[in-house]
Image (spheres, rainbow, N blue to C red):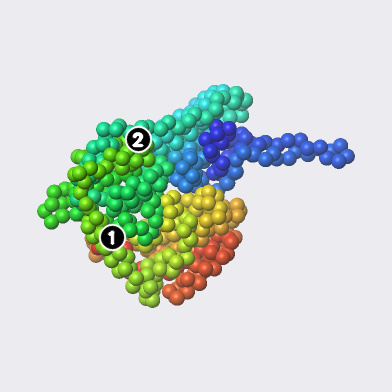
Amino acid sequence: MGAATAHGASVMWTLSGAHVFPVYDAAVGGRETVDLAGGDTMRAQREGPMRLVDVRHESTAAFAAEATGKLTRTPGLAVVTAGPGVTNTVSAITSAWFNGSPLVVVGGRSPAGRWGQGALQELDHPPLVAGVTKQAFTVTEPDDVRAGLDRAFTEAGTPHRGPVFVDIPMDVLFSHGTAGAAATEIPVSEPDPEDVDRIAGLLSHAHRPVVVLGGDVWADGAERTARSVVEELGLPVIANGMGRGALPRGHELLVTRARGRAFAGADVVVVVGAPLDFRLGYGTFGGKDGAPPAQVVHIADSSAQLARHVDLAAAAAGDLSGILAGVANCYGGPSTVDHSDWAAELRAAHRAAVASDAEDLASSADPIHPARIYGELQPRLADDAVVIGDGGDFVSFAGRYIEPAAPGNWLDPGPYGCLGTGLGYAMAARVARPSSQVVLLMGDGAAGFSLMDVDTLVRHGLPVVMVVGNNRSWALEKHPMNFLYGYDVIADLNPTRYDEVVTALGGAGETVTDPSDIGGALDRAFAAGVPYLVNVMTDPTIAYPRSTTGV
């Protein structure tokens, strides 16, 4: 595991399997003989270079490793056994692919010396994940193991970041090989100065500019530069994904709640570190009240990430800090337009949207309005709290009401939208940020995917506050189906006591049916020191207002 630790990996997320026993032995440092009094000896485990966290399902291991990569900005590591151990990670690998998360998944593999003879769990894994990884390959020689892992970690951490899969046959792992070379450094890609100059020119002439800061701003370590540049130039900002918090809540340039007005009225939209996908209207902006469409500028950490389906006015690829700093240096001159009135208009719209939330956040309705949960949670969150969303309708409310105070403190499944990330993300957050609050927000549908891994939280002493918005349905499907057909099928769930599931696994929790009891339940959860689930029974008739909100 020398290659992994050389690249900054300190935690291995796994589920025990014989195909990868030598990896565990390397991680914990093996065992040594200790002399005892009277001439006796014993075998004692050495202090190893890497922490092992074993989970109850391989998908959780891979999700935890992905979240480790997101939070630490160095590749997370999951190690799984052959066959089903690998196939159980495919959804998590795919999520990392869509999220641009640095992740290395090491799979066991049936012995090369028995290949083709029907050994246990014999499966050629790399073709299965080739389409959703940066690289997927097999290490075939003992002397190549370290070099192969170095290759995997280097590729996973090189922009644009993403997952890499490597499997190693069992007989290769159980052999002895050479240590190999030191870790390869991650290269830095410098932007084209002409591209940077063109972007600065477009912004200098913009009357109604908008900047979108996406998750790669955090991943690339560009959040401080981004804040400095938008403040210097007075550019209104909409935050997206892990870019949330680059401007803290309450910042005068943060206008995320006015994104509908901003995107409709903008004449130049600069998207930094985010794909022009469905979350950003596929890159179609402007055109309000007969005005021409906005000019779109795309800034990405690598040229492969630049949008091909949009007629871009300008684009730049490379180190995001370098690009943003270069734009600020080139910005200005006698042609520079004053857009302060536009920024003030968006700020006013943002404040009005926030003010309009007050009634729902304080709602005393019975059954409980889901917004009331966030009204109680908001004032209890510390500035360094890590908030994780895993769900559909209930977590959509979280995206609207929870604004991080700092970057790198918000995790959600991302554009792939895969439910079941929550427990893996939460345990990774607790390990990566041991002194921070960790809050996992789940819909009751999402809770069914991974709640058994509360057992992992308990066994490894990882306290997490879990809140389930329990509307007894797959609400993200139930309401649209009713709208389309006038009825719904297979969209109802039971009013399950998820808190009792957590209690049975060694944690604690409670069910809340009265809105006035939510705050006290959250206080008990934060003070518990164990995994604690607050199961809030919410009104199943209330759907997230997707057609009317600006977020």
In x, y percent, where is residue 165? 46, 35
In x, y percent, where is residue 401? 37, 62
- Check the image and report above or below for 393 versus 101: below
Where is mark 2, residue-wise? 318
Residue 420 appears in the picture as rendered: no
Residue 194 appears in the picture as rendered: yes
Secondary structure state at the residue bearing disc 1: helix
Q: Residue at x 55, y 60 (%)?
A: 531
Where is mark 1, residue-wise? 347
Q: For the N terminus, give its image quadrant.
A: top right
Q: For the C terminus, give its image quadrant.
A: bottom left
Q: Amino acid at mark 1?
A: Arg
Q: Is residue 120 left or right of residue 225?
A: right
Labels 2, 1: front one: 1
- Check the image and report above or below for 349 versus 518: above
Disc 2 or 1, which lies upstream in sequence?
Answer: 2
Q: Which mark is residue 161?
A: none
Q: Residue at x 47, y 47 (%)?
A: 71
Q: Quadrant of residue 32?
A: top right
Q: Amino acid at mark 2?
A: Gly
Q: Is residue 458 left or right of residue 414?
A: right
Task: Using the image as rendered, state which of residue 352 and residue 538 is in the foreground.
Answer: 352
Q: Residue at x 52, y 35 (%)?
A: 7
Question: In this view, which residue lies farthest toward the left?
Answer: 290
Q: Quadrant of residue 357?
A: bottom left
Secondary structure state at the residue bearing disc 2: loop
